[in-house]
Amino acid sequence: MLERYHLSILQSVVKTGTVTEAAEELHLTQSALSHAIKKLENQLGMKVWEKQGRTLKLTQAGKLILSLANRINPQFEQAELLLSQIAKGQRGLLRIGMECHPCYQWLLKVVEPFLKKWPDVEMDVKQEFQFGGMGALRGYEIDLLVTPDPLFKPGVDFIPVFDYEHQLVVARDHPLADKPHVQPHDLINETLITYPVEPSRLDIFSRFLVPAGCTVKKHKIIETTEIMLQMVAANRGVAALPGWLIRDYAKQMNIQGIRFGEEGIHKQIFLGIRNEDRQVDYINDFIQMAGLELLA
């Protein structure tokens, strides 16, 4: 019946678009690949794909198998990698997923001492996920998820590693710079610069502007923190970033942070981890180091 190689075949066919290219990617002959799928279809009593010109379209059965492949194959690959590392005397692999753009600066403070302490642990950092951050964690694409917005689900723990205040960042000579805090209506004529994130997931919108029925004059997207802050320093717009990050950059740049409202917007950064990995020594050590390095 259904075997792992069937899962890999469907994933490869969808990825490459043709049986020929999928066979090459999987180091199979085209006839061997076609025979494997034909045998599976005979056992199932239904087709898994249909030809449309030069391309293939998955049937309902094919889509179901592909969904299974996307969930199961990453777990196989992770287990095989760990077993291979154990066999070679290596320690392991730590794959970190980021749902917090400005946290890269914080992560750099943790990575250096961690790599020195754990020389046999490989590390990778990912930001693009096939199923989103939580899906990547539960699907074994990553081992730790860095996020300010945890989704509490069975099988996953979220550990708070540090608190911070989300602030408006402006140039020191900006008209708002002398205010102890800003109100939503203060920003209606401003250009807001943000990371490429849906507005509904940005606290400045969801927790500040939208509840007050306000918006900004213009919303501009910039991917990198450094360019964003250069634009702010040049009075080309304002941004919303963690207070600790603003303080770091304010040492060299013409910027400063201002509180949102009298109470401010207070947040936490969490590390998400699968329950089963709570006993992995180097992962636990990373979590412990994470909170300590923020203000080191």
Image (tube, helix red, strand yellow):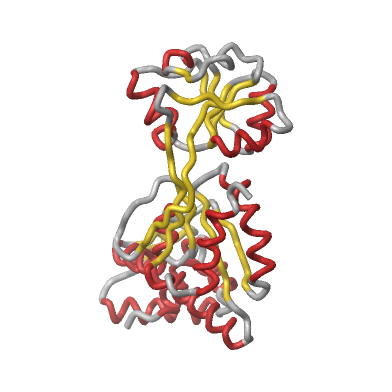
Q: Percent x, y for residue 29? A: 56, 79
Q: Nearer the viewer, residue 295 or 62?
A: 295
Say which quarter of the image contains residue 274: bottom left
Q: Percent x, y for residue 189? A: 51, 12
Q: Residue furthest right?
A: 252
Residue name at image x 56 percent, y 46 percent: 103
Q: Nearer the viewer, residue 276 or 138?
A: 276
Left or right for 126, reference 60 = right
Say which quarter of the image contains residue 43: bottom left
* Quarter of the figure with the N terminus: bottom left
Q: Residue furthest bottom?
A: 87
Q: Is residue 260 above or below residue 137?
A: above
Residue name at image x 55 percent, y 79 percent: 28
Left or right for 92, reference 75 = right
Say which quarter of the image contains residue 220: top right
Q: Residue furthest left?
A: 45
Q: Percent x, y for residue 217? A: 49, 15
Q: Percent x, y for residue 88? A: 63, 86
Q: Is residue 208 above or below residue 96?
A: above
Residue name at image x 43 percent, y 71 percent: 277
Tally of marks: 0
Q: Is residue 107 above or below residue 90?
A: above
